Image: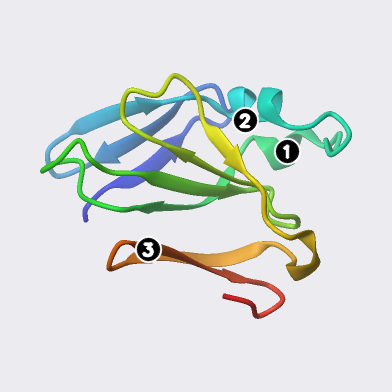
Amino acid sequence: MGWLLTQSFDGEEVNLFNPFSDTKIHLPNQFALRALQNPDDFIEEHEFYKYIKLATLSANPSFTSDYVLVISYNTDVNHLAYWLPGDINWTLFDMDERYGGVCNMTYYKGQFYLLTWGAEI
């Protein structure tokens, strides 16, 4: 769709960026994700939380404000979140930990599909 997810090295700034139109959509930063994490599940390795590994859009933000952005971060375990336009923060959702982390994601005909390292869809 022409959109890239960009993030500063320190994790403070996260954006959707369209290099063709020079449009930038500001997103909640990485520390917002960490603040939502269950403290019992928190891994004390800050590098994992500085980077979003995968991002998938449900629609092109250039043409509609009715879209969802799903991200996967810290992919050695299942950490997924989504963001809707107008949201102040990410919304986390849980996955079954027995399948390992997410290695790929896509959106097709109204559904997000995730492929885990355990070969589960």
Q: Is residue 70 left or right of residue 50?
A: left
Q: Is residue 111 left or right of residue 38?
A: left
> Up-down: is 100 above or below 88?
below
The residue that appears at 60% across and 23% down in the rendered structure is: 32
Q: Position of residue 95 (x, y in %)?
A: 67, 56
Say which quadrant the C terminus sits in: bottom right
The residue that appears at 72% across and 42% down in the rendered structure is: 48
Q: Position of residue 105 (x, y in %)?
A: 47, 64
| Residue occupied by mark 2 | 33
Q: Mark 2 or 3 closer to N-term?
A: 2
* Disc 3 secondary structure class: strand
Q: Mark 1 or 3 closer to N-term?
A: 1
Sort mark 2 into few (<14), some (14-19) or many (20+) by Cα contacts within 10 Å.
Answer: some
Regarding residue 10, the answer to whether it shows in the image is: no
The residue that appears at 57% across and 28% down in the rendered structure is: 11
| Residue occupied by mark 3 | 111
* Disc 1 secondary structure class: helix
| Residue occupied by mark 1 | 47
* Disc 2 secondary structure class: helix
**How much space separates mark 2 and mark 3, taking CA atoms?**
23 Å
Q: Position of residue 44 (x, y in %)?
A: 86, 34
